[in-house]
Image: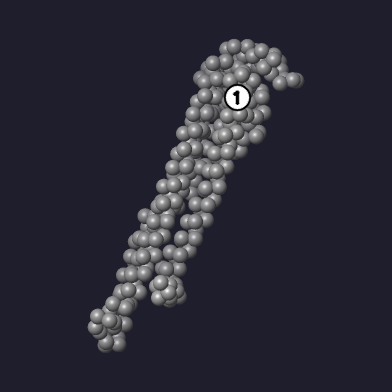
């Protein structure tokens, strides 16, 4: 084990490709940790959506649901805020289109930078192989210049050159495992967000043409004549 570590240190001092691969490994871990923290916050935001947004919507309290968006983290908050702003007449537009647009944007946010992990997983084995080829060529050149040969001399040079391939494979495995893990988390967030957004839009459209009772509004709010449905030309709220 110690001899392998010594060979690795020797390669780091002599081979710039080894330095590149080690720096890539550190960068991969940094990107993965940042994405993981972002997705953990996303799961917490989805848990808040149930109590802060969907529960008031089921009871017909649209103003309360809009205020509850403040307690939900971005970018998930923007999905429901955009739809509710248009449903309540605060912003002109179609709630369904607004929710769909912000939903796509939020999904893209959680998938940002994952391409780096996928690219590293695909390229690092070839970078390691390149380092091995360069190392073998250097070993044979040194043998030719010294005039000494034999299995012992050749095997020593090749064993050192193969370390580059081993490091490249290790970095690639690291990147692929993290990529698949984070892709699965991003897909889970996307599915849960889609379910919540669909329910919110359904509740908006079901109550689109029904007057909202005064008891369902927060104190000090103005009772709208109706809440416009997605896909229909909405009337403005009563002044």
Where residue 104 appears, x then y in whole percent? 49, 35
Q: Nearer the viewer, residue 124 or 156?
A: 156
Find disc 1 in the rendering and name its residue. 55
Characterize the local packing of mark 1: few (<14), some (14-19) or many (20 or more) Cα atoms within 10 angstroms: some
Residue at far right of view: 220
At mark 1, the secondary structure is helix
Q: Is residue 94 above or below residue 158?
A: above
Residue 26 horizontal/vertical position (percent): 49, 60
Residue at the bottom extreme of this rendering: 147
Q: Is residue 11 visible?
A: no
> In which quadrant of the rendered view does residue 65 lie?
top right
Residue drawn 71% across the image and 21% down it: 218
Q: Quadrant of the C terminus?
A: top right
Q: Quadrant of residue 57?
A: top right
Report x, y in % for residue 96: 52, 24
Q: Visible in this render: residue 56?
A: yes
In-image side of 115 versus 68 (left or right)? left
The quarter of the image holding the N terminus is: bottom left
Q: How many marks?
A: 1
Name the side, left or right, on which 172 lies relative to 38: left
């Amino acid at each position: 084990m110690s001899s392998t570590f010594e060979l690795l240190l020797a390669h780091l001092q002599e081979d710039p490709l080894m330095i590149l691969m080690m720096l890539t490994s550190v960068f991969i871990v940094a990107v993965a940790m940042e994405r993981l923290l972002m997705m953990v916050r996303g799961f917490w935001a989805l848990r808040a959506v149930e109590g802060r947004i969907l529960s008031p919507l089921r009871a017909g309290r649209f103003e309360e649901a809009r205020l509850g968006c403040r307690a939900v983290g971005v970018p998930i908050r923007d999905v429901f805020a955009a739809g509710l702003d248009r449903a309540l007449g605060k912003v002109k537009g179609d709630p369904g289109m607004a929710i769909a647009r912000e939903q796509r944007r939020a999904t893209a946010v959680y998938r940002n930078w994952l391409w780096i992990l996928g690219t590293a997983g695909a390229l690092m084995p070839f970078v390691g192989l390149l380092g091995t080829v360069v190392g073998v060529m250097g070993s044979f050149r040194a043998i030719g210049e010294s005039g000494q040969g034999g299995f012992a001399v050749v095997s020593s040079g090749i064993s050192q050159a193969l370390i580059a391939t081993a490091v490249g494979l290790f970095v690639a495995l690291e990147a692929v495992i993290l990529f698949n893990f984070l892709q699965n988390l991003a897909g889970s967030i996307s599915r849960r967000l889609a379910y919540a957004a669909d329910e919110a839009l359904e509740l908006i459209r079901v109550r689109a043409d029904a007057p909202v009772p005064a008891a369902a509004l927060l104190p000090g709010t103005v009772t709208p004549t109706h809440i416009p449905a997605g896909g229909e030309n909405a009337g403005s709220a009563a002044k």
